[in-house]
Amino acid sequence: MHLARVVGEVVATIKDGNLTGIKLMVLQPIAASGDDAGRTLVALDSVGAGVGEHVFFVRGREAAYPFYPVEPPTDAAIVGIVDHWTVG
């Protein structure tokens, strides 16, 4: 799992039918220190996250698991909203 900050939403009126009703969010991956770490990406939202929140997300085939039995075409999904974290 990876930490990220939600920086935006994606609106797509024409998309794969398996994405109907699922929010698409723009994420900025972050390091444990809170600094940006990597390029932004689009992820499906399985938990109702909003812009400005810190989340954790998964990548790869596991990203479709929260939406079972539907199998949306995705390689990234938000699976939790972070309340706080401690390093060290």
Image (spheres, grey):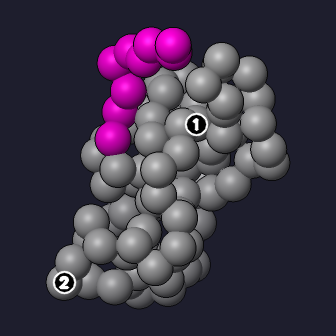
Q: Which mark is residue 69?
A: 2
Segment tinted magenta in the rendering: 80-88
Q: Nearer the viewer, residue 26 or 9?
A: 26
Q: Which mark is residue 4?
A: 1
Q: Which mark is residue 60?
A: none
Does residue 7 show up?
no
Q: Nearer the viewer, residue 57 or 44?
A: 57
Q: Secondary structure at mark 2?
A: loop
Q: Secondary structure at mark 1?
A: strand
Residue 4's place in the image compared with 83, above or below, is below
Residue 32's place in the image compared with 15, above or below, is above
Residue in the picture at 54% in, 37% down: 3
User: Within 10 angstroms of label 1, few (less than 14), some, or many (20 or more) residues?
Assistant: many
Residue in the picture at 21% in, 78% down: 68
Residue 81's place in the image compared with 11, above or below, is above
**Principal secondary structure, stretch drawn in magenta:** loop
- Say whether disc 1 or disc 2 marks the residue closer to the N-terminus: 1
Mark 1 or mark 2: which is in front? 1
Residue 22 on the magenta segment: no
